[in-house]
Amino acid sequence: AIPSNLQRHQAALEIRGVQKRFKHFTALNHIDLELRKGELLCFLGPSGCGKTTLLRLIAGLDQIDQGQIFKNGEDISYLKTEKRRCGIVFQNYALFPNLSIAENIAYGLIGKRWSKSLRQSRVAELLALVGLTGSEQKYPLQLSGGQQQRVALARAIAPEPDILLLDEPLSALDARVRLHLRQEIRSLQQRLHMPTILVTHDQEEALTMADRIVVMNHGVIEQVGTPEDIYHHPKTRFVANFIGQMNFLPAKVLSGTELLVAGHLRLSLRQSVDLPVNTEVEIGFRPEAASLVHSNAVEQQTIILSVHLTAKEFLGAQTRLTVAIRGQQTGGTRPTEYLIQIDTTHHHAGRLSDLVHISLDETQLHVFDQAGKTLC
Ligand code: ATP
């Protein structure tokens, strides 16, 4: 095993057992995390889960209550913000309106023993980097939102920080600018090989930009993984539900490898679950894990559900169908209906209220226990 002090030198940032309370409210509970060199890590989670708080602790804008933060192996837990060498970009640009673009970018270079000529060439270099050459003498309000955010990025990068911290930098921008800037930030970050943390509540932003995603909920980390890993192998029901779409159906354990779904459908599992008979669980599958089956092919399929079509939405390349499965509530005998969504490229899937057959790809089924932990 590598000694932990050596491992520390391998990570751009290492967070160990960090805790943060606001009076009696625990905003962050025992956070362990690593930002690798050159990687873009996204903090993703619903409003109030603690993303911004964690970013502020890393930047030194707030103090941790417990734990340690290391940057390139050095303990920076109690270092002042100015000494942490973190470049920060906030959602609302935070440019100085009375300073020119050049002065805004040069702001972080003052007092760092950058000579005037060095400062000027650094500003020019950064303006070129963010595609704003020629805007030196303009003022922030003369620029669009997207351009202002590019200036904020240039200002953050100017003093050559060790780490870049971006707090929802794109969320104030309109959709088209956001998409464009997403790619620009990502390619800039990769070119500079700059370890970066991006806070977002936008899952698409996280999935498209991140090397790894940290999914947070109520002050704890639910899962850390690559976008593919998080999407295909969610460790909890929360992650499965928060990232992408997932259908859930109640189920009961019949044996280690068999479930009773929605009160009447027997389902064999590829992997066994280690739970007593009759334990209540839930199955989950994504819309693309189900497909329509032609009625004469029904017998060849392993998992077949007969369902009623209740809604159709044309999405261009695909059509999203909402179908109703008749079932029984677990523990009760009253009939109920479960709505699930499936995606198909078969646009003429049937008329509303038709009985259709769908098959489930058993390799894409997830089973969750009552605490929301993924069993398989
Ligand atoms: P959002 O996406 O809405 O910004 P977030 O995940 O960034 O959410 P935080 O801003 O980190 O969430 O807040 C986490 C929790 O801590 C929230 O419940 C918030 O109300 C609380 N909190 C944050 N800062 C303070 C503070 N200074 N005093 C008291 N409570 C705070």
Image: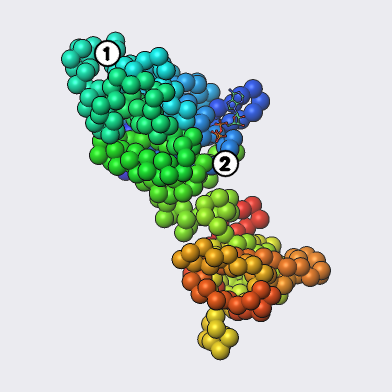
Residue that carries the numbered disc 1 in the rendered image:
112
Could you say which is closer to the camera, residue 142 or residue 157?
142
Could you say which is closer to the camera, residue 81 or residue 266?
81
> Residue placed farthest to the bottom in the image?
296
Could you say which is closer to the camera, residue 41 or residue 136?
136
Q: Quadrant of the N terminus?
A: top left
Confirm whether residue 15 shows in the render: no
> Residue placed farthest to the front in the image?
142
Confirm whether residue 207 shows in the render: yes
The kind of residue on which mark 2 rests is Pro
Per the image, label 1 sits on a secondary structure element best described as loop
Q: Position of residue 4 (x, y in %)?
A: 34, 35
Sooner in the amino-acid sequence: mark 2 or mark 1: 2
Q: Position of residue 107 (x, y in %)?
A: 33, 16
Q: Position of residue 264 (x, y in %)?
A: 71, 75
Q: Which quadrant of the structure image shows residue 112?
A: top left
Residue that carries the numbered disc 2 in the rendered image:
46
